[in-house]
Image: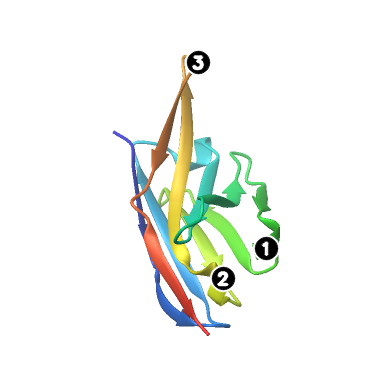
């Protein structure tokens, strides 16, 4: 059974930092592309960052240079380090993975962790 459990969210002032944690079970994070998404109130869920199986990373333009995705293979955990936070970063942040087995894909989301950035 695949489970993704996020933690690390909270309330922070603009310019501050948070580190989000996605603890995975039922999968091996180093064998899958792992993603972070976010959803602000009244808006669609949007892509934030990806770390590929090979370890390469990519980011949404608005967070490049401020956010860093990484993983700890020993802990089977993915992180999102967020620096220089802005009020517009306020959202629920989700960890996500798509598994493809026998040509069938399944999407798995965590429960989300709230990030609130005050001005």
Q: Which residue ends up furthest to the left in the rendered image?
A: 1
Report whether 80 appears left or right of 28: right
Residue at horizontal 56%, vertical 56%?
70
Residue at horizontal 58%, vertical 76%?
86
Say whether marks 3 and 1 touch (CB < 8 Å): no
What percent of the width, then of the height, locates residue 103? Answer: 50, 15
Q: CA distance from mark 1 to mark 2?
A: 10 Å
* Residue where numbered disc 1 is placed: 62
Residue 119: give its label: none
Q: Which element is circle 2 on?
A: helix
Report whether 23 appears left or right of 14: left
* Residue where numbered disc 3 is placed: 103
Report whether 104 appears left or right of 15: left
Report whether 85 appears left or right of 10: right
Please rate how many residues cluster around mark 3, counting C-alpha atoms within 10 Å: few if below 14, some from 14 to 19, many from 20.
Answer: few
Q: CA distance from mark 3 to mark 1?
A: 33 Å
**Mark with earlier residue (3, 1):** 1
Say whether marks 2 and 3 touch (CB < 8 Å): no
To which quarter of the image does residue 15 belong?
bottom right
**Mark with earlier residue (2, 3):** 2
Please rate how many residues cluster around mark 1, counting C-alpha atoms within 10 Å: few if below 14, some from 14 to 19, many from 20.
Answer: few
Q: Nearer the viewer, residue 37 or 24?
A: 37
Q: Nearer the viewer, residue 13 or 44?
A: 44
Residue 88: give its label: 2
Q: Which element is circle 1 on?
A: helix
Of tags 2 and 3, which is closer to the observer?
Answer: 2
- Quarter holding the N terminus? top left
Of tags 3 and 1, which is closer to the observer?
Answer: 1
What percent of the width, then of the height, locates residue 35? Answer: 53, 47
Q: Nearer the viewer, residue 11 or 68?
A: 11
Q: CA distance from mark 2 to mark 3?
A: 38 Å
């Amino acid at each position: 059974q695949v489970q993704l459990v996020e933690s690390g969210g909270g309330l922070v002032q603009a310019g501050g930092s948070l580190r989000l944690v996605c603890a995975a079970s039922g999968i091996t994070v180093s064998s899958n592309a792992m993603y972070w998404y976010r959803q602000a109130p009244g808006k669609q869920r949007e892509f934030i960052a990806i770390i590929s199986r090979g370890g390469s990373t990519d980011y949404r333009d608005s967070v490049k240079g401020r956010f860093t995705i990484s993983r700890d293979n020993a802990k089977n955990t993915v992180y999102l380090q967020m620096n220089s936070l802005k009020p517009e970063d306020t959202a629920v942040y989700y960890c996500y993975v798509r598994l493809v087995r026998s040509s069938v894909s399944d999407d798995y989301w965590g429960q989300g962790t709230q990030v609130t950035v005050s001005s």
